[in-house]
Image: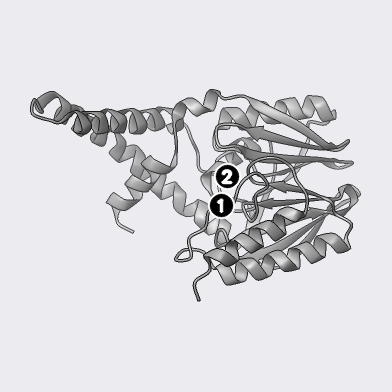
Amino acid sequence: MSTRIVFALIALAMGPASAAAEPLTFTRVRPNVLVVRDSSYASNMTVVRTSGGLVVVDGFMYRNSTREALDRVADSLGERRIALAINTHGHDDHTWGNQILRERGAPILAHDSTTAYVRARIGQMEEFRRRAPVAVKAAEDSLAAGDSLSDATRTRLRNRIARIGGNFNAHQDLVVTPPTVSFSRDTTITVGRTRFLLRVIGSAHSKGDVAVLVPSERIIAVGDLALTDELIRADPRENDLAHWIASLDRLAQDARERKIDRLIPGHGSVGTLGALARTRDHLKTLRVD
């Protein structure tokens, strides 16, 4: 991928810096399970209290949101120790909070491909920081010198300045933090007396999707494999839809056999296992054989 494309992707993907000020909402799914939503991306953090400490599934894009969520969850659940964190996949809106999780001493588990993806983002962010001031200055110079520019061009340049400059300010202190432990097969982790079943999906929404089942709490956290409030966005050219569809069926069967009845998506409301079937059926309409 060229430097120009990388820069454009970062500038466009990071979203409005002002979103960091949006509020958090909390849903108590079980006495020992809280789901926190950061409304800037409607992204979810799942926290499970165990006798060995807290287990956190995914963070947020913004470090302030991640930090505040962890503080408030600790007060609510009566536990501050973070025994473990898990990344369901590598995308920024779920992993840039890793910086805060590591600062608090949590080991972070993820699929091999997720770890590789986050590591690659380190260099891409360094490139963004080098190029952002240059891009903003170029846009400002074009505005100042372009008396003949159309209103549409002026608006586009102003939006570019606001977007890139805002993201540069919001993320200039970001330390992109990869997971500390990687795995490539289904894995079972026991924290205290609570088992966490990490189901490797692999190439579906991302290259390293993982679902987290907690049978004792009857919950499954699926990252962006399925949504409850809207239809999933997928690109047949980028996503392995056939594998994704088959994986959702296997995941649903696994969850049913373990009496799981609450599904926590990477974005949106807590729902039921029906979200897996709805997502599967939607993906079938997108599939091109």
The residue indicated by pointer 2 is: 95
| Residue 203 shows in this picture | no
Q: Position of residue 194 (x, y in %)?
A: 88, 50
Camera-side residue of 30 and 150: 150
Camera-side residue of 249 and 49: 249
Q: Quadrant of residue 67?
A: top right
Q: Quadrant of residue 136?
A: top left
The amino acid marked with disc number 2 is Thr
Q: Position of residue 95 (x, y in %)?
A: 58, 44
Q: Residue at x 76, y 29 (%)?
A: 73
Q: Is residue 44 left or right of residue 50?
A: left
The amino acid marked with disc number 1 is Gly
Residue contact at pointers 2 and 1, CB within 8 angstroms: yes
Q: Residue at x 78, y 50 (%)?
A: 272
Q: Quadrant of the N terminus?
A: bottom left
Q: Residue at x 45, y 29 (%)?
A: 17
Camera-side residue of 263 and 171: 263
The residue indicated by pointer 1 is: 90
Q: Position of residue 279 (x, y in %)?
A: 65, 58
